[in-house]
Image (cartoon, coloured by chain):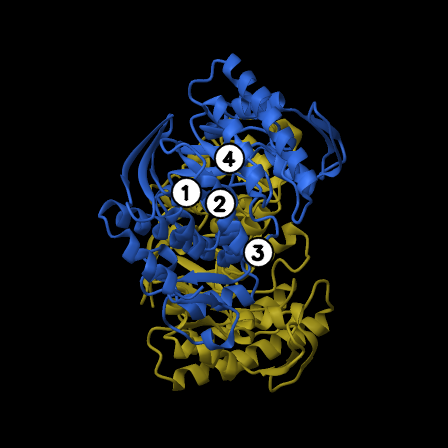
Chain colours: A yellow, B blue
Amino acid sequence: MNFEILATCPVTGARAGLLHTAHGTIETPVFMPVGTQATVKGVLQRDLAGELDARIILANTYHLFLRPGADLIKNLGGLHKFMSWDRAILTDSGGFQVFSLSDRCKISDEGVLFHSHLNGDAHLFTPQSTIDAQLAFGSDIAMVLDECPPYPVTHEVARAAMLRTVQWAGIGYSHYLEQEAPDTAVFPIVQGSMFEDLRAECALRLQELDAPGYAIGGLSVGEPREISLEIAAFTAGLLPCAKPRYAMGVGTPKELAEHVARGVDMMDCVMPSRNARNGYLFTGSGRVIIKQARYRDDQGPVDADCGCYTCRTFSRAYLRHLFQAGEMLFSTLATIHNLRHYLDRMRGLRAAILDGTFPAFLTTVQALPA
Amino acid sequence: MNFEILATCPVTGARAGLLHTAHGTIETPVFMPVGTQATVKGVLQRDLAGELDARIILANTYHLFLRPGADLIKNLGGLHKFMSWDRAILTDSGGFQVFSLSDRCKISDEGVLFHSHLNGDAHLFTPQSTIDAQLAFGSDIAMVLDECPPYPVTHEVARAAMLRTVQWAGIGYSHYLEQEAPDTAVFPIVQGSMFEDLRAECALRLQELDAPGYAIGGLSVGEPREISLEIAAFTAGLLPCAKPRYAMGVGTPKELAEHVARGVDMMDCVMPSRNARNGYLFTGSGRVIIKQARYRDDQGPVDADCGCYTCRTFSRAYLRHLFQAGEMLFSTLATIHNLRHYLDRMRGLRAAILDGTFPAFLTTVQALPA
């Protein structure tokens, strides 16, 4: 993996770049659609590539490790082949899901022992085993195992989780270096909850690994959005300029711009796809809550400024009907739209950075409805 | 609407034709995918037209009358525009669903009073009102209101329902003729349960209307499949040669061929789409029940002889994973495959009729697994 910065906004520090991977080049800043179980829910792979032009998607180590299993995916030729997606894939370490989804998880220096939320089976995730799983997937970007504390949390607990995260990053990264895996890049994750001293210590110590990119974890865990943004900005500022910075689990459409303005290059979030399925559609002029009676006979598209298949083809009235009738086509059409909205927003931000108009563009974006 | 017969198999009576409608020409025999609520569940309209090349789909008057309403659809430019489908649409009369889905339905000479299964509201369907609803939709082919008795039923009850069906067909057809609706053709429906004398009487009396096509109703209501086929064959033989014959709610892949061999031109069934969602996939060598462990690491396509997107792109192992994970993408991919299988079967039958090899082709089809 190789990261090339093409332009940096002199006012904000926002960067436009190219991330070269074994599965294509990704224009940054980039939003990565979430494909938890080796599928972006409801969207055909060809629409993900064609309609949305997503260059990289995220998949989830915890889920895929449990089902269908890392060995199975490896034996079938890796995750790209398994899911017929020849563009880039980032996988998270599974740490976040172990803590949030599994039953009775028990943490130790060695790793985290947990029980599958699917069938109760016990599994141990270690810094090494989660790297092994991601190498079995053939991920372009893999994450080290981290401990992501809930919010709020005491400084003491946050510090212990941060130290464990640093320790595990070292173990996992060394384990990765011992393998022959030139097509997989591994990113450590900065933790430290909302404490700047902990974030700083974590960011500095992780840089000893000289990894090709760094993630900012522990965001979007229930904290106020302003604090989230402050911590992301603070942490981004501590990370090496020449390497991609990935804010995990971020964010709302407006937060995309705010994070880019603070030097973040990569983001992912279930919001566009999950909100889509729940009937919330993003537009340049605010959110469309499709179940509202006002859309009953609305012949217009969801967003007249959007070029997606959904907006080119269907009316709000039809989409409302599908939603009210509980038809799965609604989820597909809404997800296509929301993801296109996110990806187009990122493309707009990138274009503004490249042509030197980012500060003015940011002001415009900040003035949009939430 | 205009029906043109291009070839008739001299041995079986199977016909290949062209059905010209205001929304394109349909090659018959034809299988019509079911789009109950103005969507073929899980399939994008562009894939329905492109990937499957469906020329006509079926939508449901009962469901669309209740939600979003016939007036709304009319005000939005009709059903084709509402659902962005510029090819042909056939709508059923709603009679079958009134009897099978609604609460507390009460039948009289005037029509059928029923309570919506959605909210309990009372509605009256009459032979006139169901024509009006379908004209509001702008259907290419509309059905008259019929009374479809359950199975088994006494001769007396079946006869009463048949006589009512004939009476309603007369009223509905006269009402239709009073409207200016040159782009909508109306088909009466032959009832009579499994009694040949009733089927014969119904078929003959309905021909007094000189309608442009006739449907065979009252099939697939729980009767043994052999009886169903016998009655369809018997009824088809009583209908005018020059007009399309539509067997409603038919059938399994093998039944398609059997009905075509008995002079049926049009069929519809929820089986390919519903079975798809339940993990049952049709292939030339039998059914694939995707949840089976044998497919866990099966790298082959569902059907190596199928050219659909699903078979061109994804393995059985991936599809099994999606199914086991409850991912909606499974339903979409499986529905695309099953519908393509049905439509390709019909295209194969048609080609054999046209090139004079239908009897041999039928023998081959009959030898296939169920």
The image quadrant where one finds the N terminus of chain A is bottom left
Cα distance, mark 4 to mark 2?
56 Å
Q: Find disc 1 in the rendering and name its residue.
A: B264
Mark 3 to mark 2 CA distance (whole Å): 12 Å
Do pointers 1 and 2 mark residues of a single chain? yes
Element under disc 4: loop
Dot in front, 4 or 2 = 2
Q: Is residue A74 above or below residue A262?
A: below
Q: Nearer the viewer, mark 4 or mark 1?
A: 1
Which marked residue is nearer to the observer: mark 1 or mark 2? 2
Q: Residue at x 52, y 49 (%)?
A: B270
Determine if residue A259 is in view: no
Question: Whole-Å distance between the Cαs marked 3 and 1?
Answer: 19 Å
Judged from this view, the residue extending furthest toward the front is B197
Confirm or deny contact between disc 1 and disc 2 (CB under 8 A). yes
User: Which residue lies at the image location 53% right of the left edge and 55% below the top edge?
Assistant: B225
Q: Amino acid at mark 1?
A: Val
Kindly identify which numbered label has been placed on residue B192. Answer: none
Residue B86 place in picture, x, y as percent:
40, 31
Dot 3 amino acid type: Pro
Labels 3 and 1: the sequence-earlier one: 3
Where does residue B144 sit, x and y in percent of width and height?
56, 28
Disc on res. B224: 3
Label 1 or label 2, whichever comes before in sequence order: 2
Q: Chain of mark 1?
A: B
Disc number placed over residue A284 in the picture, else none: 4
Residue position marked by numbered label 2 in the rendering:
B232
CA neighbours of label 3 inside 10 A, class few (<14), some (14 to 19), many (20+): few
The answer to the question of whether label 4 and label 3 lie on touching residues, with beta carbons closer than 8 A, is no
